[in-house]
Image: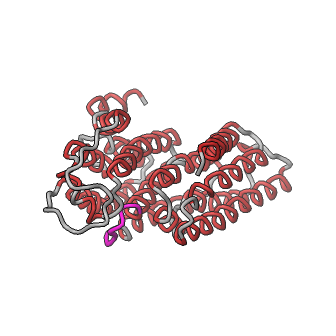
Amino acid sequence: MTPQAKLIFTSSLLLGSTITITSNHWITAWAGLEINTLAILPMISKSHHPRAIEAATKYFLTQAAASALVLFSSMTNAWHTGQWDITQLTHPTSCLILTSALAMKLGLAPFHFWFPDVLQGSPLITGLLLSTVMKFPPITLLFMTSPSLNQTLLAFMAILSTALGGWMGLNQTQIRKILAFSSISHLGWMAIIIAYNPKLTLLNFFLYTLMTTAVFLTLNSTKTLKLSTLMTTWTKTPALSAMLLLTLLSLAGLPPLTGFLPKWLILQELTKQDMAAMAVTISILSLLSLFFYLRLAYCATITLPPHTTNHIKQWRTNSPISPAIAILTVASTMLLPISPMIPTII
C-alpha cells in the first residue's frame, strides 16, 4: 500500500470517528460509522491473502448489517416520536434494536463470531485499530444512549461475553485470536456497568486501549503471531519480553497493576446498585480469561533452545525498544499505586 493511500485511509478513519463522536443527529452518526467501515476495509485486505479477503468480507457484511439496524432503530424512533436526536431515544422497540445493533458492531456475545476471524486475518497494526479505534464510536453511542438502552439485554450479553471470551480463548494458539477473545471478555465488563455508571465504561475502555496498544506494538516489534514463536522471544529481546509480561498481567486484571483498577471500581459500583450476585458471577467468569493471560505471560518469559520456526528474525537479533512501547508499558502497569484515591475522587 502506497503512503498516499495510507494517508487517505487513516484520515478517513479519523474523520468517520470524529463525525460519529461529535454528532447529535442519527443520520450523521450513521454516516460516520459507514466512513469508518469503508476506511478500514482496504487495511484489512491489503495483503491480498485469501484469509485477509475473507476477513474483510466478514467485517463488511457484519458492519453493514449493524449500521442498517442503527438506521432502522433511529427511523422507528423518529416515526413514533418525531425526534432524530441521539439522546431522545424513547421508543422501546427502537431501544431494543439499537442495543442489538451496537452489540453487533462491538462484537458482544452472541454477536461475537465475526471478530476473532477478522482479527486473525488482519495484520497486527490493523488488528490494533479494530480492537481500539473502531470500537470507540459504538462505545460513544452507548454512552450517549445509556439511559435508553435495554438493561436486561445488556446484562445478559455482558455475562455471556465474559463467559465465552474466557472459555473460547482457552484452547487457542494464535495470539490474535486470544487477543480477540480478550477483547470480547473486556467488553462484557464495559457493557454490564454502562447503564449505571457510564463514566466507568469510558475509564475501562481507555485503560483497555492503553494496555492493548502496548501488547500489539510489542508483538509487532518482535513479529510474533503464535505461542510457539512467543516462546523464543525471551532470548532475542529479554527487556521487551519482560515489558510484555507486565502488560499481559495488567490486562488480566491482577493487582497491583493498572488493569485491576476498572474491575475493582465496576465491582464496587455493582455492589452499590444491589447487584452483588452479578458482581460475583462476572468475577468468577473472568477467572477463565485469567488462565490464557497467564499462559501468554509464561510463554513470553520462557527460554527455549533454537528450533525450526517460521519466525522471520534470526536467532539473537538485537531489537531496540521503541520509546512508545516503553511509555505505554509503564503507563499500563504502574498507574494503580495512586488508585486508592480514585474512588473518593469519583
Label the magenta part by its dominant secondary structure: loop
157 above or below 215?
A: below
Q: Residue at 17% x, 52% y: name it.
A: 235
Which residue is more in the foreground, 198 or 55?
55
Quadrant housing residue 307? bottom left
Q: Which residues are magenta?
A: 170-176
The quadrant of the picture occupied by the C terminus is top left
Residue 291 lies, in percent from the top left, at 26, 62
Q: Residue at 50% x, 38% y: name it.
A: 199
66 above or below 131?
A: below
Residue 42 lies, in percent from the top left, at 62, 56
Q: Residue at 31% x, 32% y: name it.
A: 339
258 to the left or right of 126 = left
Q: Residue at 46% x, 57% y: name it.
A: 188
Which residue is more in the foreground, 145 or 279?
145
60 above or below 255?
A: below
